[in-house]
Image (tube, rainbow, N blue to C red):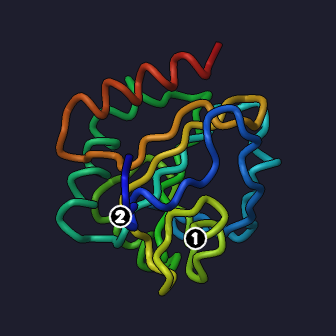
């Protein structure tokens, strides 16, 4: 038995089969910030991938986002909404998305409200690590990858399998 739980293990957040916590947040992409905030409810009927990450333009995060970009058609496609979420401002995310040509949208969780609902933040409100949630068309969590290992190619294979299963 474990006598202590490291901080990374202590956070649980929504588990597979749970209804995903509702949210509303400002999105941005390579064309700038989108005026109307998006809600999870507005995405019902789509597979939604929430990819929490620590900070825009940092090395590990850049590896992760470029991998999503380079595998976008094979992993995500038209019926899947990928939202990469950090505490960066919408302007910082839009600038990065434009510079790198990212085809997906970013969620600006500046106050870490969404991160707290999904239990991926530190006590200070920063994104703790890379955590990914695949949410099925029914609004329930279909897969949790905690942590998401951005430098491990098998993470992307596992993600693809989870998305394919959630599409059914």
Decide: is 144 above or below 116.
Answer: above
Which residue is located at x 64 percent, y 48 percent?
Answer: 14
Query: Residue 132 appears at what percent x and percent y?
Result: 47, 47
Query: Mark 2 and mark 1: span between their CA atoms?
Result: 37 Å
Q: Nearer the viewer, mark 2 or mark 1?
A: 2
Query: Residue 73 appears at what percent x and percent y?
Result: 40, 28
Q: Residues within 10 Å of mark 1 (few under 14, many from 20)?
A: many
Query: Residue 13 appears at what percent x and percent y?
Result: 60, 54
Query: Residue 15 appears at what percent x and percent y?
Result: 61, 41
Q: Which residue is mark 2?
A: 6
Residue 88 seen in the current view: no
Q: Which mark is residue 130?
A: none
Q: Which one is nearer the viewer's eye here, 113 or 85? A: 113
Dot 2: what SS? loop
Decide: is 77 above or below 98.
Answer: above
Q: Which residue is mark 1?
A: 33
> If the image is split into quadrants, where does the C terminus sit?
top right
Q: Name the image quarter holding residue 96.
A: bottom left
Q: Is residue 71 left or right of residue 75?
A: left
């Amino acid at each position: 038995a474990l006598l202590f739980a490291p901080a990374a293990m202590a956070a649980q957040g929504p588990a597979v089969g749970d209804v995903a916590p509702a949210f509303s947040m400002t999105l941005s992409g390579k064309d700038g910030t989108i005026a109307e905030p998006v809600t999870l409810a507005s995405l019902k009927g789509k597979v939604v991938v929430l990819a929490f990450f620590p900070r825009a333009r940092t090395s590990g995060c850049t590896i992760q986002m470029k991998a999503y970009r380079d595998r976008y058609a094979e992993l995500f496609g038209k019926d899947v909404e990928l939202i990469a979420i950090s505490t960066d401002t919408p302007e910082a995310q839009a600038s990065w998305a434009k510079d790198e040509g990212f085809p997906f949208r970013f969620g600006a969780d500046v106050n870490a409200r969404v991160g707290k609902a999904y239990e991926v933040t530190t006590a200070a409100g920063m994104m703790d690590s890379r955590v990914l949630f695949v949410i099925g068309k029914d609004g329930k969590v279909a897969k949790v990858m905690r942590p998401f290992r951005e430098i491990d190619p098998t993470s992307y294979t596992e993600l693809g399998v989870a998305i394919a299963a959630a599409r059914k």
